[in-house]
Amino acid sequence: MREATIGTPVRISKVISDMKLEPYLLQLEVDGLAIVPPEVHGFGLDRIDQMVEFILGKAEEMTGSPFTLENGPELKLKFPANSRGLSAFSDEEGQPSQFLIQQLGRQHRMFRDLAVNPTAVALIRQTIGSKSTRFSSHNSFVKWQGDDGYGSSLGLHADQSGLPLPWGRTALTANTNWCLTDYTLEGGALAYVPGSHRRGTRPTFPQAVKEAIPVVAPKGSLIVFHGATWHGAFPRKIPGMRISVANYYRHLMVTSQEDIQGSFPRELADDCDSPELFKELAGFSDGFPYQNPGQPIPRVESK
Ligand SMILES: [Fe+2]
């Protein structure tokens, strides 16, 4: 029988204690967001550098402009006339200075390895549920200097906002930000409101902006946050780039952003650090949504 003793939680999962993740779990529980350094999550900086290279190359392929870490896009970029730009987050006008590279898990093995990083998955499973955690999407935010950012709201939102209130303690979605470059206030760091996940509701303005603080973290850090945590980003005020990978997770009863379960190439799932874990988080064996009827049908008994 386990015993309660001074200063040692009884209901801590073995995975968390074996991996010595208690300080990060505490930060995640109390603040709704935890910052894990590279030496703890163990995803090497060599692979982080490889990701930066890949993303800079992909950004050029997608936009037509070369990108450098020092200057961002080397040529002037313009978003399509029909894109909503800043008005997606506020009524203000302005040009965004970031875009997304989506479906990273299909593009290179290193992104699949990142999605099954044991530290990230352990902390995410603590918030959503060990058996019920699934992938939602794997995207990179490519951001450069721009005064407008998300506008005066800082784009503050809770990721699980699409789900009806009331929200409970269990996260319905949870997110990670892998910092591929340093996160600083002037550099356009993630903004968040500590403890906001415990309010169990969407942000209210302007109060949320007053309470928001930057998440300052060196390159290679892993940021994990609850789906009810209010977050956005500060504008990047200095030259250069902020690059991140957002691996987003969901409860299995919440729909995913990317159709990983239905259309992700099965053979790619086998090519990563933990194929069985990848397939479980991808939901390949889940009962819902079904494409064909699978329930047993009774038949007239033959004599
Ligand atoms: Fe978000």
Image (cartoon, helix red, strand yellow):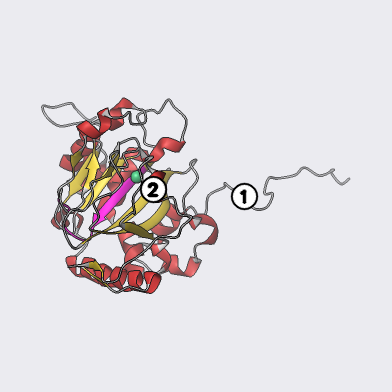
Q: Which residue is mark 1?
A: 290
In the rendered image of this protein, does residue 81 appear above or below residue 3? below
Q: How many marks?
A: 2
- In the image, residue 12 sits, relative to residue 283, either above or below, namely above
Q: Earlier in the sequence, mark 2 or mark 1?
A: 2
Q: Quadrant of the C terminus?
A: top right
Can I make out residue 58 in this image? yes
263 relative position to 215: left or right? right
Tell whether position 264 is magenta: no
Image coordinates for residue 73, horizontal then vertical, percent = 27, 68
- The one nearer the camera, 285 or 1, is 285
Q: Residues within 10 Å of mark 1 (few under 14, many from 20)?
A: few
Residue behind mark 2: 249
Which residue sits at x=37%, y=50%? 248
Question: Do the CB atoms of the residues marked 2 and 1 lie less than 8 Å apart?
Answer: no
Q: Which residues are the magenta region?
A: 174-184
Q: Quadrant of ligand 1?
A: top left
Question: Mark 1 is on which residue type?
Answer: Tyr
